Amino acid sequence: MPRASKTSVVEPPPISLINFREIHRSTATRRVELIRHGVRAVELKAMVRMMDASQDRMYKLLRLSPATINRKASRDEALSMEDSERVVGMSNLIGQVQTMVEQSGDPTGFDAAKWLAHWIEEPLPALGGARPADYLDTMEGIRLVANLLATMQSGAYT
């Protein structure tokens, strides 16, 4: 009886949360793997610094406990799957903005993380005067914001 060949499956290296472009361009399967594995709290803190946003404000928007994040960061631990999902969603939004700018012209000098941190705080007519930040606490809300960004890129934004 012939032996089944053992083929080793080479797993791709983990995606870094702060490699926004890679998060956005990766497959949903890879993002799910990252979420299931858990985002390291220190990477979340780095992402918030890159956004030049208040940690307290960003944690509140994403329904994250500052005490938990700080404790996990000091121990180099990962966030829960539920928390990681919203954090990966935010990273994906930054990557989406980076990609949009790259596709639209010269991205030199443009900082997608800082732009997004500012933009999400602005009331928008497309949201009935609400801010995109008001929707970042759920995955459905993050998808709504992603769709709004895509609409802006297409020129159909109102």
Image (cartoon, grey):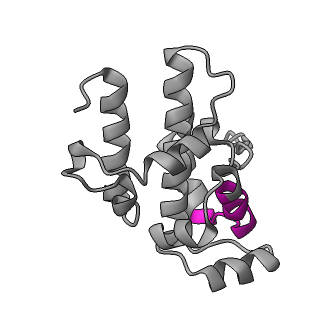
Above or below, comparing residue 104 to residue 84 in the picture: above
Q: Left or right? Give the position of 54 relative to 5.
A: left
Say whether residue 44 is magenta.
Answer: yes
- The residue at the point 48 percent across, 53 percent down is 89
The chief SS type of the magenta part is helix
Q: Nearer the viewer, residue 52 or 135?
A: 52
**Residue 126 image-quadrant placement:** top left
- Which region of the structure is painted magenta? 36-48
Q: Left or right? Give the position of 6 relative to 51.
A: right
- Provide residue 143's location: percent of width, then percent of height: 34, 49
**Residue at the top extreme, as displayed:** 105
- Provide residue 147's location: percent of width, then percent of height: 32, 40
Q: Quadrant of the N terminus?
A: top right
Above or below, comparing residue 16 to residue 44 in the picture: above
**Residue at the left extreme, as displayed:** 128
Q: Quadrant of the C terminus?
A: top left
- The residue at the point 51 percent across, 45 percent down is 116
- The residue at the point 24 percent across, 25 percent down is 156
Q: Is residue 26 visible?
A: yes
- Provide residue 48's location: percent of width, then percent of height: 65, 59
- The residue at the point 32 percent across, 51 percent down is 123
How many numbered dots are placed on residues in this image? Answer: 0
Q: Nearer the viewer, residue 121 or 74?
A: 121
Q: Is residue 23 visible?
A: no
Above or below, comparing residue 118 to residue 76 in the picture: above
Say whether residue 100 is magenta.
Answer: no
